Image: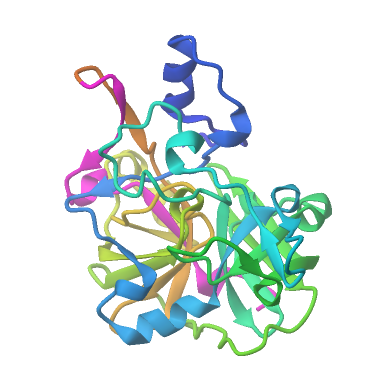
Amino acid sequence: MQIYRFKLLVTLVIVLAMGTRVHAANISFENTDLIYGLDDRYEADEYADNDFIDKSSAVALRVPSRRLSEDRDNTSFLNFPFRKLSQAVPNICSTEKFVDQYSVGDCSGFLIAPNKLVTAGHCMFNQSECSSNKWVFDFKEGVTQFNKDNVYSCKRIIAQKYIYSKTEVNDYAVIELDRVVLNRKPLVRRKFGIVRTDTPLLVIGHPMGLPMKITDGARVSRMNKIEREHKVQSWLLRSNYFTANLDAYSGSSGSPVFNKNTGKVEGILIQGADDFFFNEETQCLKSRHLSNSYLNTFEKVMRITKIPGI
């Protein structure tokens, strides 16, 4: 499957065709995903399992530094633009979930050590991206300012790869933060072996740069219909990743994917299918929905055991 550095979706093609002026930075949602079966996205603090609510404290949102400004009245806080999802994705249907929430960042990541964060490789290409972005913890619904104590800089890239070829899939980045993260527990991960097919999964992240969501209802899948066309090649490639029917959007890239039974991280979300389609009847962009059949499962999860430097 061909991957594009700046994948603007069918969304951008549709919007441009309609004559609407759109800034690419607003909807450069690459490696995106969609909804399988029911929409299983929940506000992080409203999820039923407190253990995973606790784990969400180790998940961060990547926010471009240029979007943040120090508050004039209280220098302990940073302001961000109050840009709603309806503004970030022009022509999105007003009935879409979370359409009135703020969309602030563009990737997710998580703590794997007190000063180390893991994300997708396409979220952190080089030192320039390292220097020009911040990592923000505790961005949840209702937050209108960032406490500086929750905002961290990328000091350096420890390890990074972004390769999608016929012989290799690698999409990860391990970065060192500018200081030790206090009062947050790094996530526990699988250290050997592989997760079994049909294992229940859960993902925590920031779909479309929104306040943090916890999403369950997913399982480890068998080869999808595209992979099955090249079974031997796909079997070899899947040594580095597995597929799952995760309800996740762009911005979820880099999110930790958990084994719901053990609570351990099995991998990082790295790739999926397009988020939206243009609904001719309503004349707006609507989330794509697919069945839970493994043949339609296009979300790739980079195995955490295959990531060096952690």
Left or right relative to 117: residue 256: left
Q: Is residue 185 magenta?
A: no
Residue 73 at x, y = what percent? Answer: 74, 65
Depth check, front residue: 7 or 135: 135
- Name the residue located 51 percent from the left edge and 51 percent from the top edge: 209
Residue 190 at x, y = what percent? Answer: 46, 82
Bounds of the magenta segment:
282-310
Please determine whether, in this image, residue 276 is positioned above or below residue 218.
above
Residue 121 placement: quadrant: bottom right
- Name the residue located 52 percent from the left edge and 83 percent from the top edge: 187
Residue 309 at x, y = what percent? Answer: 70, 75
Residue 261 placement: quadrant: bottom left
Q: Quadrant of the C terminus?
A: bottom right
Please determine whether, in this image, residue 290 is positioned above or below residue 269.
above
Q: Is residue 273 visible?
A: yes
- Name the residue located 60 percent from the left edge and 79 percent from the top edge: 112
Q: Is residue 195 visible?
A: no
Depth check, front residue: 246 or 167: 246
Depth check, front residue: 299 or 241: 299
Left or right relative to 285: residue 252: right
Q: Is residue 306 magenta?
A: yes
Left or right relative to 310: residue 216: left
Please determine whether, in this image, residue 279 is positioned above or below residue 237.
above
Residue 308 placement: quadrant: bottom right
- Name the residue located 48 percent from the left edge and 35 percent from the top edge: 87
Residue 35 at x, y = what percent? Answer: 27, 47
Colour scheme employed for the rendering of this structure: rainbow
